[in-house]
Amino acid sequence: MYITNMTHVLDDEGNITTKGTKAGRLFASFLAMVIDSITQEYSEENPVIRCYKKNCSGFITTYRSLPDDDILWYCSECNVEGVISHWRETKWNNKENEVLENFEIDQQVVAWMKRLESELTFPFTVKPQPFIKNDFPDESDMVITRIHHFVDDYGLIVELQQVDQTHYLPLCNLEIADRASDNTKLINEFLSWWYSTEDREL
Ligand SMILES: [Zn+2]
């Protein structure tokens, strides 16, 4: 996992610093492309970003994570991944993207995260939704232990324990075992709010 504060790889003019190693500069240029890409309005024609690793032909997937407002990136081919912070003040941030500029929604998400953390009773048992069941052949109990973070597209990511394994999964891929519990009520309230923000299909 590479964790980069973008301001640390820039010079006083906001360009990628010429100090340091060539590999370091190439990596910084790659991160600049990631910022440029995630901050563009979504279009099928948006250029794809290739993994920066030599000998890897994978493509990079990006998400924005709340409450920290970081950019997460990863390559599904070689599994290299990283986090970029302090990207908003860089020149690669295309500021016209409505989704990323909607601070009001961000604040509501953060408020929801706090509310879920404090009002849900942890841990609680869940099972995978039918469409991801094949990925979890082990049928032992899965319990949600905490809210982890929030990403655009997948929504709330929770931390789960299954025997001695830890998983991170979108809450919307899970079903709460006890349908009549207060946890279920609160989560359903959250999910209907979340779906309503992005015209999602239930
Ligand atoms: Zn790769």
Image (spheres, helix red, strand yellow):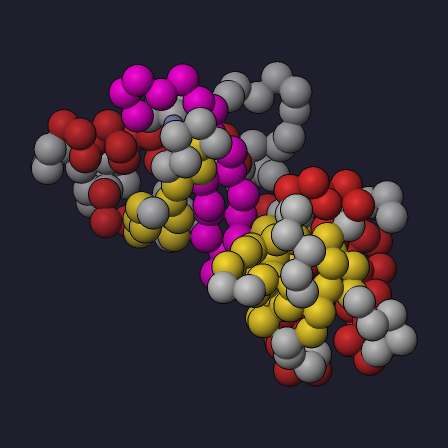
Q: Quadrant of ligand 1?
A: top left
Q: Residue at x 26, y 32 (%)?
A: 27
| 142 relative position to 48: left or right | right
Is residue 86 or residue 154 the one in the foreground? 154
Rendered position, 193 above or below 27: below
Q: Residue at x 62, y 32 (%)?
A: 41
Is residue 111 or residue 40 the one in the foreground? 111
Would you say residue 175 is visible in this rendering? yes
- Residue 118, quarter of picture: bottom right
Give the mark count.
Answer: 0
Magenta stretch encompasses residue 56: yes
Q: Position of residue 130 (x, y in %)?
A: 80, 45
Q: Position of residue 58 (x, y in %)?
A: 44, 22
Magenta stretch encompasses residue 88: no
Rendered position, 121 above or below 66: below
Would you say residue 92 is visible in this rendering? no
Q: Residue at x 69, y 56 (%)?
A: 139
Q: Residue at x 84, y 78 (%)?
A: 181
Rendered position, 119 above or below 83: below
Q: Position of residue 179 (x, y in %)?
A: 87, 70
The magenta span reads 53-73
